[in-house]
Image (tube, rainbow, N blue to C red):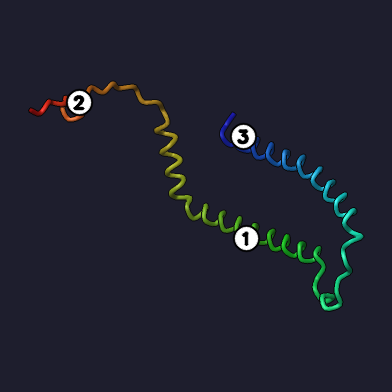
Amino acid sequence: MSTMLTLEKWQTDYLDFVKRVEEPVVRFTGRMAGSVAPYVPAKPAAMKSLPAMTEVVDSGLKFRRRMVDQNAQFVHHMMKALRPMTEKFEAAHVETHAPKPHVEHKPSARTAPRRMTKVA
């Protein structure tokens, strides 16, 4: 299996795991909210002009989507700008990928272990 296929499989497995964990958390949260709801006070009159929580969350999620899309576009532009370098690197990598023959290195006078001499 190639590195990219392995990475994609790990990503899919992770997202599947997160989805399985989210479902019981949402069920538990719903039960808890139903139990606590009778004790939550109504929104004070001074806060009536504030947006609902769902509006704030939806706005944040829309911003997140716009930000991710803009960053993805930037990354694609950067990859295009880097293409002359990356194509050369990738081509060089493919050419030099062949295994090199094993060469046994014998220690030289400079790299051989030195003997400790006793100082009198």
x and y percent of residue 117 in the render? 12, 26
For image coordinates 80% across by 71% down, the residue present is: 51
Dot 1: what SS? Answer: helix
Nearest the viewer among 88 and 45 is 45
Label 3 residue SS: helix
Of the residues shown, which amino acid type is indicated by label 2? Ala
Q: CA distance from mark 2 to mark 1?
A: 58 Å
Q: Quadrant of the C terminus?
A: top left
Q: Which mark is residue 112?
A: 2
Q: Is residue 43 above or below residue 62?
A: below
**Exactly how many numbered labels are in the figure?**
3
- Residue that sits furthest to the front in the current view: 120
Q: Please identify the quarter of the rendering in which residue 56 is found.
A: bottom right
At 80% from the left edge and 73% from the top edge, which residue is drawn? 50
Q: Residue at x 75, y 65 (%)?
A: 59
Q: Give the amino acid at mark 1.
A: Gln
Element at badge 2?
loop
Residue tagged 1: 70
Mark 3 residue type? Leu
What residue is pinned by disc 3? 5
Image quadrant holding the N terminus, namely: top right
Q: Report crowding for label 2: few under 14, some 14 to 19, many 20 or more residues within 10 A (C-alpha).
A: few
Q: Report how far apart the C-alphas of labels 1 and 3 lie in the structure.
A: 26 Å
| Label 2 vs 1, first from the N-terminus | 1
